[in-house]
């Protein structure tokens, strides 16, 4: 009689996808893992990373996974002016970004003041504000040194 197989341990990737109410698929798993290693990545860079592990995936499947992740709140899309949309997994706080005007490098900056939304407008026009997005622009050290 063969020994019973050990239960398959759920990965943190699988758990995150399931907590969002999504079904775990090879493409979603690969997109999530790609976002872990490529924060602030555009969809095309994520597709290149994903197709290395899931060769049968399509660009549309990657876009669908990203859309699902953004809709369910496990990923965030940022859109710095003049740049393609970028995706990141850091969604549990209200942080900001700094973008290099020469090379396009993007880095996170913790909230400028206090808790989310760390900036408060003078007039809300009746809105209940929950997030403030600020993008700082400048030269990264590599570009400034060049």
Image (cartoon, grey):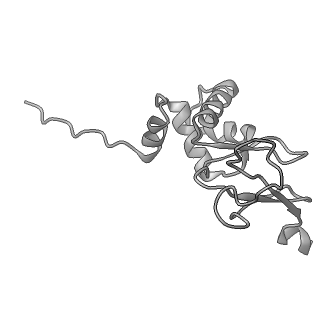
Give the camera-side residue of 109 and 50.
109
* Residue sitting at x 70%, y 50%: 131
Image quadrant assignment for residue 120: bottom right
The answer to whether residue 7 is above or below residue 143 is: above
For this orientation, the residue located farthest to the bottom is 145
Give the camera-side residue of 145 and 79.
79
Q: Count the numbered circles shown.
A: 0
Residue 3 located left or right of residue 117: left
* Residue sitting at x 43%, y 47%: 12
Residue 116 located left or right of residue 79: left
Q: Quadrant of the C terminus?
A: bottom right
Give the camera-side residue of 137 and 8.
137
Q: Quadrant of the N terminus?
A: top left
* Residue sitting at x 65%, y 31%: 67
Residue 137 at x, y percent in the picture: 88, 61
Residue 59 at x, y percent in the picture: 69, 28
Residue 75 at x, y percent in the picture: 62, 43
Residue 124 located left or right of residue 139: left
Residue 121 located left or right of residue 49: right
The answer to whether residue 137 is above or below residue 49 is: below
Residue 27 at x, y percent in the picture: 55, 31
Image quadrant assignment for residue 10: top left
* Residue sitting at x 58%, y 50%: 36
């Amino acid at each position: 009689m063969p020994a019973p197989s050990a239960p398959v341990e759920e990965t943190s990737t699988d758990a995150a996808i399931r907590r969002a109410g999504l079904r775990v698929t090879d493409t979603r798993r690969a997109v999530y893992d790609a976002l872990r290693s490529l924060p602030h990545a555009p969809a095309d860079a994520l597709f290149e990373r994903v197709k290395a592990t899931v060769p049968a995936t399509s660009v549309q499947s990657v876009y669908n996974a990203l859309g699902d992740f953004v809709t369910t709140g496990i990923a965030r899309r940022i859109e710095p002016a003049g740049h393609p949309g970028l995706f990141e997994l850091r969604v549990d706080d209200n942080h900001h970004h700094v973008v290099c005007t020469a090379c396009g490098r993007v880095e996170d900056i913790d909230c400028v003041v206090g808790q989310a939304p760390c900036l408060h407008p003078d007039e809300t026009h009746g809105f209940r504000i929950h997030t403030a997005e600020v993008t700082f622009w400048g030269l990264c050290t590599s570009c400034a040194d060049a």
